[in-house]
């Protein structure tokens, strides 16, 4: 509550990757606005996010995003009680723009500045989805840059149980989609195409990370590459498959043109479905094991890949069998957004976790 007893309205700024986003949230729960401008279309021709383009787009759009966010919330700047901003992790050039903008706003309005961990904000979206949710819970963060399992404790404390040893799961979706000629970002494309495909059991071996809560997706990505290469050769066509890592991000690929020749569209859908099933199974099995090991029965899944429909369906099935409560934020709170930053800033403000204007961004921040 403000000194006058009114609700606390926090404005949250997110610029860690290619979304310029500002949301306003009341008391950490009530969403007043959530405006997201993405520079995605500028990156698609390159098949991945180009940091310089992302940074420039933030500078060019952040003022408009602020104006729209205030309008959507029917607020004037002086009605904002605090300014929150993603401190990290993320692209260095993109983060500093959001932070500098937040500092300017906090200074001008004479309001507290609250730095926020992007990964914690993804999980906090679970609280904005299910107001009854209480820590401790097992958190699964699945995004384009991160894949990790943690226990979220009270006091905004996190205990990391495991993380990916190589590619993030979203990155694997994007690279496999690129290999299959599905364009960028690949996650939503694979999600859609998989509905028309038939997943083949055990077609792709999973890298073993037995006895740990770590993940690995690089081996799966390579297995898809080798499978596609073999199928292409078997079909008598010259292989035109590019290894996903050999794709030059600086050279535009033409539209959605497939990098595989000789594969029918049904085969491509089957490969997409098989990859997705294997990745989803890996995420679900590790999370169930974390629940078993910790005895915790609440789970929050956050980050861009949490929009994946097969992941949601598998968790829904397992929740029934294992008597778990699994919270998935709606897709608008799974993608990078400012509302989740504004949301988590409320408990942080209550705990006095405000920063001075000398605070720096941290591209490698990880659930501190
Ligand atoms: O959290 P996010 O918006 O940005 C990062 O913090 O990285 O996540 C972006 C990632 C991308 O890799 C994108 O392909 C993936 O989320 N993604 C999906 C889906 N929607 C977005 N992956 C699988 N299925 C989806 N429906
Ligand atoms: Zn994210």
Image: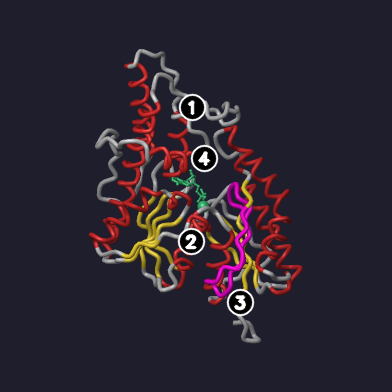
- The circle on residue 120 is 2
Q: Is mark 3 within 8 Å of ligand 2?
A: no
Q: Earlier in the sequence, mark 4 or mark 2?
A: 2
Q: Secondary structure at mark 1?
A: helix
For disc 1, does the CB lie below 8 Å from ligand 1? no
* Residue 103 lies within the magenta run: no
What residue span does the magenta drawing correspond to? 15-36
Nearer the camera: disc 4 or disc 2: 4
Residue placed at 39% from the left, 72% from the top? 134
Q: Earlier in the sequence, mark 3 or mark 1?
A: 3
Q: Mark 3: few, some, or many residues within 10 Å (few <14, many ≥20)?
A: some
Mark 4 vs mark 3, CA separation in Å: 36 Å
For disc 4, does the CB lie below 8 Å from ligand 1? yes
The reply to whether dot 3 and dot 2 touch (C-beta < 8 Å) is: no
- Quarter occupied by residue 50: top right
Secondary structure category for the residue under label 4: loop
Seen at 39% across and 60% down, the residue is 139
Cα distance between the residues tagged 1 and 2: 32 Å
Quadrant position of the N terminus in the picture:
bottom right
Q: Which mark is residue 185?
A: 4
Asked which secondary structure carries label 3, the reply is: loop
Task: Estimate the x, y position of residue 241 in percent, counting from the top left.
Answer: 44, 22
Tell which residue pokes out farthest to the bottom in this image: 4
231 to the left or right of 28: left
The answer to which image quadrant residue 316 occupies is: bottom left
Q: Are marks 4 and 3 in contact (CB under 8 Å)?
A: no
Q: Earlier in the sequence, mark 4 or mark 3?
A: 3
């Amino acid at each position: 509550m403000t000194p006058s007893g009114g609700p606390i309205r926090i404005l949250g700024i997110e610029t860690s990757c290619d979304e310029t986003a500002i949301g306003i949230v009341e008391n950490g729960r009530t969403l007043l606005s959530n405006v997201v401008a993405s520079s995605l279309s500028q990156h698609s021709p390159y098949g991945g996010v180009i940091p310089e383009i992302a940074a420039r787009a933030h500078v060019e759009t952040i003022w408009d995003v602020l104006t729209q966010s205030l309008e959507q919330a029917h607020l004037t700047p002086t009605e904002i009680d605090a300014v929150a901003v993603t401190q990290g992790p993320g692209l260095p050039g993109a983060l500093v723009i959001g932070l500098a903008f937040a500092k300017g706003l906090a200074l001008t309005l004479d309001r507290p500045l609250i730095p926020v961990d992007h990964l914690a904000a993804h999980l906090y979206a679970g609280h904005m989805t299910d107001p009854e949710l209480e820590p401790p819970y097992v958190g699964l963060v699945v995004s384009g840059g991160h894949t990790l399992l943690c226990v979220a404790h009270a006091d905004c404390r996190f205990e990391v149980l495991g993380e990916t040893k190589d590619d993030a799961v979203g990155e694997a979706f994007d690279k496999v989609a690129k290999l299959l000629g599905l364009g960028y970002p690949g996650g939503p494309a694979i999600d859609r195409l998989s509905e028309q495909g038939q997943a083949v059991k055990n077609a792709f071996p999973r890298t073993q990370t037995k006895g740990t809560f770590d993940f690995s997706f690089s081996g799966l990505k390579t297995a898809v590459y080798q499978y596609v290469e073999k199928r292409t050769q078997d079909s008598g066509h010259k292989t035109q498959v590019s290894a996903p890592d050999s794709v030059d991000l600086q050279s535009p690929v033409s539209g959605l043109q497939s990098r595989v020749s000789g594969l029918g569209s049904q085969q491509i859908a089957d490969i997409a479905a098989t990859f997705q099933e294997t990745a989803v199974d890996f995420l679900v099995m590790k999370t169930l094991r974390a629940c078993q090991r910790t005895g915790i029965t609440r789970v929050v899944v956050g980050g861009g890949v949490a929009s994946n429909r097969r992941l949601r369906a598998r968790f829904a099935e397992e929740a029934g069998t294992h008597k778990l409560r699994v919270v998935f934020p709606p897709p608008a709170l799974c993608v990078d957004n400012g509302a989740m930053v504004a949301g988590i800033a409320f408990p942080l403000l209550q705990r006095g976790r405000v920063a001075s204007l000398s605070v720096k961004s941290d591209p490698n921040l990880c659930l501190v």
